[in-house]
Amino acid sequence: MAATSPLYNQLKDAEPFFLLAGPNVIESEEHILRMAKHIKHIATKVGLPLVFKSSFDKANRTSSKSFRGPGMAEGLKILEKVKVAYDLPIVTDVHEAYQCEEVGKVADIIQIPAFLCRQTDLLVAAAQTGKIINIKKGQFCAPSVMENSAEKIRLAGNPNVMVCERGTMFGYNDLIVDPRNFEWMREANCPVVADITHALQQPAGKKLEGGGVASGGLRELIPCIARTAVAVGVDGIFMEVHDDPLSAPVDGPTQWPLRHLEELLEELIAIARVTKGKQRFQIDLTPYRD
């Protein structure tokens, strides 16, 4: 079994929680560097450990015409520049087992997309890099499935695993966040992360001019889901942040505006500091006597 990484221990021990944040996809080197600068400044100011997030390829877009990103080779070069320029750990996602080794040379956390959370070969390949693995719970999965997915990482020799709640399908074009999942996913015996932006997607819920569909979303409810998650006592918050969400080429409807990031984080920290959500409530069922 590989050793537990120092970053994993830092994130596990973060109080009140850690932050995985950044724009959904790499749009350009200039944009990513600028976003990393601003988000690091805010995270440092409010006192949260930050792992910077962006994707080099969005392989599961609704339409084949949709923007996917610069690809692995160019994307990893850009993320490496972010890492060096701002001394930030990086989280990015993989979609194929062959990507894991190269991605692991740059990323500190390898993220498994929700659609792929049960793909054993992908999980094992990611685990073998020794990096932290963040597994997003499939929209189609019960929370108990994440125990199995986390165990696949550990059985491959890697103790550095986290699980992430990002909503459950509710009909065809909507997701709901069941707060009970934050409790139940603790059975995976690892840090629990709340994805407060993807959880508000409306998959294939927006018709496009000229035909076809794209994902919509409910950005205005991001604070609602975030407040709920920290009150329950999650270990980390995952959120996609953009300086101009209306022009974002990917998931614009569920990216949080950079201008409101500090304000929201300050409120979430305040909630997290007063809740006892990370402690199991000790319920006394002995008869009450006056």
Image (tube, rainbow, N blue to C red):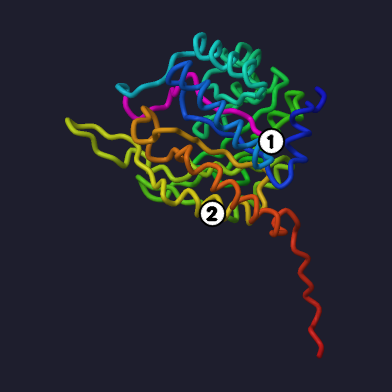
- Tell me which amino acid carries mark 2: Asp
Q: Residue at x 79, y 84 (%)?
A: 288
Rendered position, 167 above or below 151: below
How packed is label 2: few (under 14 Cα within 10 Å), some, or many (20 or more)? some
Q: Quadrant of the N terminus?
A: top right
Q: Residue at x 66, y 24 (%)?
A: 89
Q: List the residue tagged with mark 1.
A: 49
Viewer-nearest of discs 2 and 1: 1
For mark 2, give the secondary structure: loop
Which residue is disc 2 drawn over?
178
As drawn, the residue found furthest toward the left would be: 210
Magenta residues, as a range?
Answer: 49-63
Give 66 or 11, whichever is nearer the viewer.
11
Amino acid type at image mark 1: Pro
Crowd rating for badge 1 (residues with CA inside 10 Å; few <14, some 14–19, many 20+): many
Name the secondary structure under disc 1.
Answer: loop
Dominant secondary structure, magenta:
loop
Considering only vertical position in the picture, is 23 above or below 173? above
